[in-house]
Amino acid sequence: MRKSCLSTTFLCLVILFSPSLVRLQGQQKQVSERGPSGQMPPKQPFSASQWKKYTQELVTKILKDQPGSEDLIRNLKIKIDKRDVAYAGSDADRKLIEIFYGQIKLIDNEDEYIFVLAHELGHVRLQHKEIYILYGWTSYYDKELRRQEELEADEYAYNAVKAGGYNICAPFLIESRMAAIFISAYPDIERQSTLGILTDIFQSRLDAMRKHCESD
């Protein structure tokens, strides 16, 4: 079963998380209809400058009440990439957050976008150092360290979502879509060992998000 899951990761993720997705979609629908701000820029036509301004506003909202965040608010660099790639990333040393258009297309509402941004902010604020590149990991990759860093960034983001009054189920919903699309979309990831690492980490993250959603 394990080997089969590695070769059909998309199907396995759907099977593993579909029951929770179905149950939580009703909760998300109510939040999607009201929208915390109602100010999300349009996805089509896509304007990187509009999304950069909107992203900066949300980042400031996340950080403004956090002790010692003044320097990061002033110096954080935000890049909106127009490429149709389902990805968001961060660089703690450069104080950089990068959001791709393909990631923005997956987002249904501000609840979900806040989580994506807060997750990347978490990596920056927590000074995570694990090296990651778009199409896989470098030779310096440490699976358990990466899992720990991803879970820490998720916890930081979850607290931001909750503190802002956003839908606490939004992280699970956006990350479920991300997991399936990210893993299935990159043919460059050919080795089963790398695919297995991706699957394991996504499953760890989704398990934690689901518990938050169901318990709170």
Image (tube, rainbow, N blue to C red):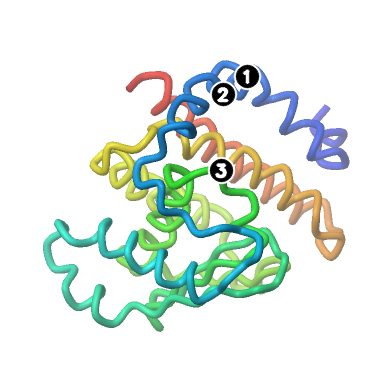
Circles 1 and 3: CB atoms closer than 8 Å: no
- Of the image marks 1 and 3, the number of the one nearer the N terminus: 1
Name the residue at 44% across, 71% down. 129
Q: Secondary structure at mark 3?
A: loop
How packed mark 3 is, by other alpha carbons closer than 10 Å (few <14, some 14-19, many 20 or more), is some
The one of 136 and 63 positioned closer to us in this rendering: 63
Report how far apart the C-alphas of labels 1 and 3 lie in the structure. 16 Å
Quadrant in which the C terminus appears: top left
Q: Secondary structure at mark 2?
A: helix
Q: Toward which corner of the image does residue 185 lie, by quadrant?
A: bottom right
Name the residue at 43% across, 48% down. 115
The one of 44 and 116 positioned closer to us in this rendering: 44
Report how far apart the C-alphas of labels 2 and 3 lie in the structure. 12 Å
202 up-or-down from 28: above or below = below
Q: Secondary structure at mark 1?
A: helix
- Callout 1, which amino acid? Val
112 up-or-down from 71: above or below = above
Name the residue at 58% across, 20% down. 20
Residue 93 x, y percent position in the rendering:
39, 81
Across the whole image, how many numbered discs are drawn on residues? Answer: 3
- Callout 3, which amino acid? Asp
- Of the image marks 2 and 3, the number of the one nearer the N terminus: 2
Residue, disc 3: 108
Residue 10 x, y percent position in the rendering:
79, 39
Residue, disc 1: 22
- Front tag of 2 and 3: 3
- Callout 2, which amino acid? Gln
Residue, disc 2: 25
Circles 1 and 2: CB atoms closer than 8 Å: yes
Report how far apart the C-alphas of labels 1 and 2 lie in the structure. 5 Å
69 up-or-down from 65: above or below = below
Residue 150 x, y percent position in the rendering:
47, 52
